[in-house]
Image (cartoon, grey):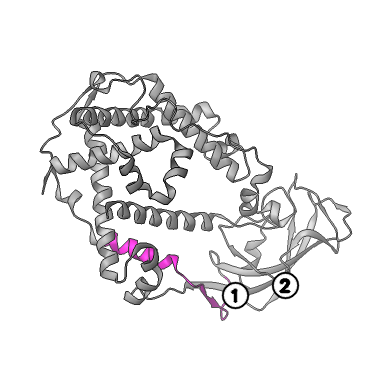
Amino acid sequence: MKQLHKRFSALLCLLLAAAVLAGCSGGSAVSSGSSASSDAASSEAASSDASSAPEAEAYDYSAGLTDEGYWEGVDALSLVTLGEYKGVELPESVTTADPATIDEQLESIRQSYSTGYEEITDRAVEDGDTVNIDYVGSVDGVEFTGGNTSGAGTDVTIGVTQYIDDFLEQLIGHKPGETFDVNVTFPDGYNDSTDAEGNTMVLANQDAVFVVTINYIQGEAILPELNDAFVAENLAGQFGFTTVAELRAELEASLIEEQELSFWSQWLLDNCTVSEVPESMIQYWKDGTIAELNATASAYGMDASMLLSMQGFESEEAYLESIHESVTESCKQRLAVQAIAQTEGITVTEEDEIEAIGEENHAEALEYYGQGYVRMTLLVDKVFERLGELAVRA
């Protein structure tokens, strides 16, 4: 059951992450990017076009780790002075779940099962509205590739979605069902396009006319009622929940588990003294961070330097410097975990791996992450579980 808590918590994270990505995507042939193609210009399509990006190199997650999940060549007991971890009092704020937080999680689940949005057609477009539109663009009366929604409709949010010039602002005041011209000028450096015959069309600095039709203004999300029937239909197969009460109980247990994880993570930093953090550990976490960064950048069709630049970092070195303190703290936590594991004789077995990962995913996880990394990760779970067993609960 404990592992189910974690899997379900992970599901919530994935749902929220998907919502964030969906909210950030957008753009089109008239986005503020440098391409005339609706696929290439939109941030969503460009980010999904990973074929042109350099493939991220494989990373050895278990490098520097023993098969037992310990740090190779590191005797944690010689580096860590453990605090008194037996009988620690867990405050009520850690051992109970906040009902408001559970309500928010339930609402997030309900939101993820939206069947669409209400379509508003009886008022004019206002700043901040999300609007579904179609358009056909042309320069000097000639349509260009990528400047046409082909009647498929596209959602844009005025003041949020990035289109060239003041394209979206010109929608304000018009009503759904109207068709009208939007006049814009392509910016300097905008990529060339082609006409219907494949002839090159220079768009940079050119005036363009887009014939726009407003289909509808996006209203409130259409959501299902969160009742037992909804839970049974959507969550029984994967998670076994058939009632709202069961779902809520599982969310409460998961939240408490997360709170305890956070509590013990901070407790280790506050109550265990680490005399030295081996440089090999710090380098391990930095290498892993960069590997994940490269993988993310590759998935979005860009290199790591571009992704870092979007986050406000001038270089990889600047980024690593910004995370040095957090990396060091992570290393101290892992050293303390290993020291407690050594003291308590806590180990991870193959049975533990299968229980946590699932037999169907076990071999694949070992192949991808390596046994050292898998066991290091599970060692944290087992140590925190032991600390919880030794704690006094409010």
Residue at left offset 25%, top offset 37%? 266
Residue mark closest to the camera, 2 vs 1: 1
Q: Foreground residue, 82 or 185? A: 82
Q: Would you say the residues marked 2 and 1 are in contact, meaning their CB atoms lie under 8 Å apart?
A: no
Q: Which residues are magenta?
A: 100-125
The amino acid type, in three-letter code, at marker 2 is Phe
The mark that comes first in sequence, 2 or 1, is 2
Side (left or right) of 358 relative to 301: left
Q: Position of residue 129 (x, y in %)?
A: 54, 67
Q: Quadrant of the N terminus?
A: bottom left
Side (left or right) of 18 relative to 337: right
Tally the marks. 2
- The correct choice, above or below, for 386 with respect to 169 in the image is above
Q: Position of residue 7 (x, y in %)?
A: 36, 53
- The correct choice, above or below, for 201 with respect to 336 in the image is below
The residue wearing badge 1 is 216
Q: Position of residue 225 (x, y in %)?
A: 37, 76
Side (left or right) of 250 relative to 42: left
Q: Foreground residue, 158 or 345? A: 345
Crowd around label 1: few <14 · some 14–19 · many ≥20 (10 Å): many
Q: Which mark is residue 180?
A: 2
Say what secondary structure mark 2 lies in.
strand
Tell me the distance, in whole angstroms, between the alpha carbons under discs 2 and 1. 15 Å
- The correct choice, above or below, for 26 with respect to 347 in the image is below
Residue at left offset 35%, top offset 25%? 71
- The correct choice, above or below, for 141 with respect to 315 in the image is below
In reply to whether residue 174 is colored magenta, the answer given is no
Q: What is the quadrant of residue 77 in the picture? A: top left
- The residue sitting at the bottom extreme is 122
The amino acid type, in three-letter code, at marker 1 is Tyr
